[in-house]
Structures are given as C-alpha cells and as structure tokens.
Amino acid sequence: MLVSAQSSPISDKAKKLHFSSIVIDTHDDTTQRLLDPHFDIAVPHTDGNIDLPRMRDGGLTAIFFSIWINGKILGPDAVKQALDQIDAVREAVRKHPNDLILATTADDIREAKKQHKIAALMGVEGGHMMGNDLAVLRTFAALGVRYMTLTHMQNNEWADSSTATPEHNGLTDFGKDVVREMNRLGMMVDVSHVSDKTFYDVLDVSKAPVIASHSSCRALCDTPRNMTDDMIRDLAKHGGVIQINYHVGFLSQQFRDYEKAHPEAEKEINDEVKKRCGTDEICSGVAGDQVVRDFMKEGKLPKVDWTLIIDHIDHAVKIAGADHVGLGSDFDGAVMPLGMEDATHLPQITDALLKKGYSESDIRKILGENTLRVMSEVQRVSRDLNK
Ligand SMILES: [Zn+2]
C-alpha cells in the first residue's frame, strides 16, 4: 500500500469499519484509460489513481465509471463515442469476471460486496451525448447507465452549465422532459456541472431525489462548480446527496485564487505534461494530476492537503446532515491533493471522520449508504411512474 508522507497510521477501528462498509465513489474518469488497448485495469499502475488492485487496497466497493466526451462534440459523433465508452466499461467487466460485476441497482452493489467483487456502474457526464434524442437516453439506460450529469462545461441545447454564459435560463421545456424521462427510467439526475438556475429547475421537475456526483462546497472554495450552502440544503430537502469532489481547485480557496492570479501556471503545467506525454492523449489525461502535485512539492504551486476533503465533508454534514453527503472523487479526471494520490488512501477518510467524533453509522452513510438510499428511491419512483 502506498502511504504518503502526510498520512498518519490508520487505527484498527477505522480499518475494520472501512473494510466492512459499502464504499461508493460516484465519479471516476478511468473510462478514458479503458479505451487504451494497452491499459489493463487488473494490474497495479504507478500512474493514474485507479486500478483493481488499488481499489481493493482502498476498500472501494463500487465505482461509477464516467462516460465523458468533450462538450463541444455533438450529434451522431457524440452518441457513437459515448457508446464506445459504455462498451469499454462492459468489456472490462466481461474480461475480469472474478473482480468486477456490472451493477445497476443498490442490491447489485450489496451483492458485489458479498462476493468480494467490485461493482462497476456507469454515469454519462454531459447531456450532449444523448444527441437531443430521448431514444438514445433510453438506450443508455438499457445498457446499464444509472445517472446522467445534465451538462458538462458547456451549455447544451436544453440546459445551462455552471461554467458557460447562460442561454436558456436553466432548463428548456425539452430539458424538463429529459428529467421526467430519467425519472421514469430510474436514472439518477446528476446536478454537478449545471448552473444554479438549472439546479433549481431540476428540483422543481424531478419526482426523485437527485445527486451532485462530484461537487464540493462553495462556502469553502468559491467556484461555480461547487454548491452554495442553500443549494446543499435544498438538495437534501429533496432527499438527495452531494458527493464531495477531491479536485484541488474545488477544495482549496488558496489554490483557486492562485490559479486565477497566475494564468501562466496553466501553460507551465501543460508544457510539462507535453514533455512527459508528447501527443499521447490518454497519457496527458492522467499526467496533469502528477505534474501539479510535483509542482506543489517543488513550491511552484500552493500545497493542497487531502484533509481539505474532510473539511468539505464536515461542512456539508453541518449544513445538510450526515444523510446527504457522499464521495465522488473525480479520480483519473482531476488533480488529487497531497496524501490522496490514489484509491489506496480512502481508508484515511474513515479514520479522520472517526477522529472527528463521527458515529460509525454516520460514517457508513457517507461512505456509501446514502448513495444506495438514493438509488433505491429513484428505482421506487421509476416503478410508480411506470404503473
Ligand atoms: Zn466533471
């Protein structure tokens, strides 16, 4: 097990609790690596954050593989590339039947835990991939996709993103139909990435609880990708869960301010990634994570420690209660803080929450039970709507 200089030993109590709990990560971008024919998820890697041995070391029960393409790719190309990624996840499960189970329900995840396997789930990150076609959305659901993030960084034709200039004042009428159809299909609506107005439109329309699969708290780090205290409270009132994102630029105000004040830093990071990866896109996808941490250690960027993840969890719990917080790392798609270099470090979260005085039952909820509850509730609503 890789242990960073920052992490203290994990208590036996924490280990016991962590490895007996259902631990769910609702957002991982490892799918991009699955597209590389040379990448084998079953062997340990020194780069990236996720592979099967490291998931086992970190006690991860279930992972939502993100189906993601750039938000500027639209129409049939977008649909085709999304289907290729869905196929890549399903093929990974087929090739590793002793390690992975394709899961679509809360019961499937509990069953995977019983069988000492890892549950593989899928979420589509960006409504642009359904090509404005509810038939494609239904096909995604039939292939096992269990959530869709309504937008990525760009607006699409029916929903505004948090990182673009508003065009639709939230959801269009068709956007509302998408949410209704997701409710009927039993797909979770994911509000990470959407604009604040889109978020409130979703809460108005959705008959089922919704998730923010990988967002953190705006009160601690002011970026439009994070949620305000009011949004977290309203999400919770609606039965939903905010799954805390570990990305350094969403955790640390100091890092975020530095990024804003020093736009040249991004170029320096990109130059270093190019030096390490050349034109290899898949290498570039994970190398930035390492480069930023190397720069932090060299003093070129503000240091961001993994314990900020605990601060965001604790803030969200204070705002919304322990029933409405979960984990959505953004592993293999973002920059992990020092001390959370990969999935092997997850037991530190359990240890830190115990040391903060959290009850074992609240910790189990945060690790995975809250997400299971939303999945079951979304299924129940789907059954009712299909009656
Ligand atoms: Zn994202």
Image: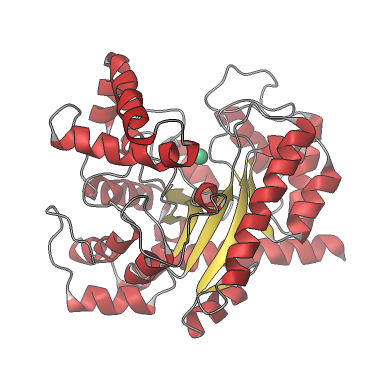
Note whether residue 188 is visible: no
Q: Identify which residue, 372 or 44, lies in the foreground.
A: 44
Q: Identify which residue, 368 or 127, lies in the foreground.
A: 127
Q: Residue placed at 38% from the left, 35% from the top?
A: 277
Q: Residue placed at 22% from the left, 46% from the top?
A: 338
In the rendered image, residue 122, in percent from the top left (x then y), is placed at: 61, 56
In the rendered image, residue 349, in percent from the top left (x then y), is placed at: 28, 60
Q: Which quarter shows the N terminus?
A: bottom left
Note whether residue 72 is visible: yes
Q: Identify which residue, 140 or 387, lies in the foreground.
A: 140
Q: Is residue 96 left or right of residue 301?
A: right
Q: Residue placed at 24% from the left, 39% from the top?
A: 293
In the rendered image, residue 355, in percent from the top left (x then y), is placed at: 18, 64
- In the rendered view, would you say 71 is above or below 307? above
Q: Which quarter shows the C terminus?
A: bottom right
Q: Is residue 136 left or right of residue 117?
A: right
- In the rendered view, would you say 239 is above or below 234? below
